[in-house]
Amino acid sequence: MKVITKVAELRRALADVRNAEKRIGFVPTMGYLHDGHLALISASREHCDVTVVSIFVNPTQFGPNEDLSRYPRDFARDEALCGSAGVSIIFAPSAEEIYPAQFESFVEPGELAKPLCGAFRPGHFRGVATVVCKLFNMVQPDVAYFGQKDFQQCAVIRRMTVDLNLPIEIVTVPTVREPDGLAMSSRNRYLCPEERDRSLAISRGLFAAARAMADFG
Ligand code: PAF
């Protein structure tokens, strides 16, 4: 497994792969990997010859009062997990590599980014769409994998991929949950025991709605 931090080096490494007509799978992440990420990696490994994982805590998708500085990071652990999961390349650029000093061009998503999470996090999906578009241009994968947990993110990225004619297949992978139903997320570590307990209302509500729909149908 190679760990690459520069775009030019990434392009060189992937040129050989592309020339050999190998299928490139891409899993974009912000690191602090959990079993949800490993499910994305495993889906990529199943269908692609080479799997690239990016680890980049993207500053443009965090609002001014959000958790950018305290977002959990543990590169050594992520590297070990990727190594044992069979990842071919980790791309772990610096913020300057992705957003050099004169950077000023963004991808602006439309209506899909306005409700739900978008209503509470102004600019969030603009930052997500921008970094994912840039990473797609850097990696140029055949397929990219995203978790269904981030439902609105998946919708925004699918729309962007179609709207900008990016020749990339977007695959969404079912949410991986803790045994009690909590969706796995790097941010779960922020929850104190009481909050964690209360958060189970979300999965319980979703499962109850699914059961009600099934009974109705
Ligand atoms: O889902 C995430 O971890 C991030 O939003 C992504 C897609 C890696 C972009 O920074």
Image (cartoon, rainbow, N blue to C red):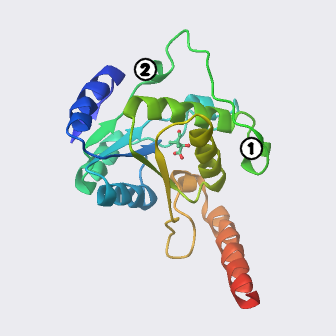
The quarter of the image holding the C terminus is bottom right
Pointer 1 local density, CA inside 10 Å: few below 14, some 14–19, many at least 20: some
**Quarter holding residue 94:** top left
Q: Residue at x 73, y 46 (%)?
A: 112
Position of residue 86 in the picture relative to residue 62 (left or right): left
Q: Residue furthest bottom?
A: 215
Position of residue 20 in the picture relative to residue 152 (left or right): left
Instruction: Using the image, tell me which numbered label, if any, was put on residue 97.
Output: 2
Position of residue 216 in the picture relative to residue 41 (left or right): right
Q: Is residue 170 above or below residue 15?
A: below
Q: Residue at x 38, y 40 (%)?
A: 141
Sequence-wise, the earlier of marks 1 and 2 is: 2
Q: Residue at x 67, y 37 (%)?
A: 124
Q: Nearer the viewer, residue 109 or 199?
A: 109
Position of residue 114 in the picture relative to residue 171 (left or right): right
Instruction: Using the image, tell me which numbered label, if any, was put on residue 186.
Output: none
Pointer 2 local density, CA inside 10 Å: few below 14, some 14–19, many at least 20: few
Where is residue 199 shown, x and y percent of the image?
67, 65
Q: Give the alpha-carbon distance from disc 1 to disc 2, as whole Å.
A: 27 Å
The quarter of the image holding the N terminus is top left
Q: Residue at x 71, y 81 (%)?
A: 208
SS state under label 2: helix
Q: Nearer the viewer, residue 195 or 17?
A: 17
Instruction: Using the image, tell me which numbered label, if any, was put on residue 118.
Output: 1
The three-letter amino acid code for the residue at tag 2 is: Glu
SS state under label 1: helix
The three-letter amino acid code for the residue at tag 1 is: Gly
Q: Find out if the beta carbon at label 2 lies less than 8 Å from the nearest ligand 1 atom.
A: no
Where is residue 121 shown, x and y percent of the image?
73, 40
Q: Is residue 126 above or below residue 117?
A: above
